[in-house]
Image (cartoon, rainbow, N blue to C red):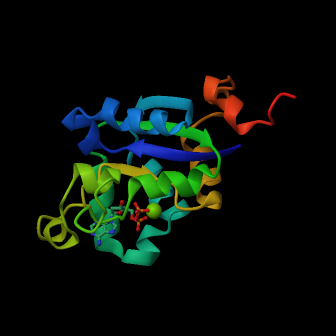
Amino acid sequence: MEQTLLILKPDAVMRGIIGEIVTRFEKVGFKIVAMKMIEPDYEHYAQHYEGIGTLKTRKGDEIFESTLASMQEGPVIAIVLEGVEAVEVVRKMVGDTQPKTALPGTIRGDYAHVTYGQASQVGRGVANVVHASADKDEAKKEIAHWFKPEEIYDYRVVHEQFTQPRKQ
Ligand code: DAT
Ligand code: MG
């Protein structure tokens, strides 16, 4: 089964919507196999956003530095979700990077509305509630960066029966 990394960003934690967001993934049937509150330092985020995510290379120094500063405003919740094509389905649920253009029904579309332009005016990374791995390779590297193998759990949830062969 595929795994992906989800992070509830400081804006989600400080707004008190951790439970609502986690519930969305539980309802869809994803299994939470790891979860912790953590307040990483600059180096950890530099590795996450550039070493793995190539944010500085893709979008430049200013966006990279403002995103790292915004992420360090408070603790985050890091979660590993497991399910069928988890990376792609979780990204679908998260929506577009810019909340203004994220569709209603997605987390970024339902819980935020802000724009790149406004974020840049105030020197912030755009406050978009959650991070989710963009592809399978990123997911693999990010999970290893955020969790030790012994922090990831193996157990069964009841709805797993619906993804397995039917009993004869
Ligand atoms: P995503 O988080 O959708 O994978 P990304 O990897 O390109 O998007 O960017 C990582 C984070 O950086 C993003 O969640 C918010 C911030 N960011 C990206 N582009 C930005 C921009 N133009 N202005 C402000 N913040 C931005
Ligand atoms: Mg990304």
Asked whether, in this view, residue 85 is left or right of residue 78, the answer is right
Residue 13 visible in rendering? yes
Q: Residue at x 65, y 47 (%)?
A: 84
Location of residue 45 with respect to 124 vertically, above or below: above
Asked whether, in this view, residue 157 is left or right of residue 129, the answer is right
Q: Quadrant of residue 18?
A: top left
Q: Quadrant of residue 62?
A: bottom left
**Front residue of this view, candidates 12 and 72:** 12
Q: Position of residue 10 (x, y in %)?
A: 28, 42
Q: Residue at x 56, y 58 (%)?
A: 88
Q: Residue at x 21, y 36 (%)?
A: 14
| Residue furthest to the front | 168
| Residue furthest to the right | 168
Asked whether, in this view, residue 129 is left or right of residue 167, the answer is left
Q: Indicate the quadrant of ligand 2 in the picture.
A: bottom left
**Front residue of this view, candidates 142 and 112:** 112
**Front residue of this view, candidates 43 and 51:** 51
Residue 46 visible in rendering? no
Q: Position of residue 89 (x, y in %)?
A: 53, 53
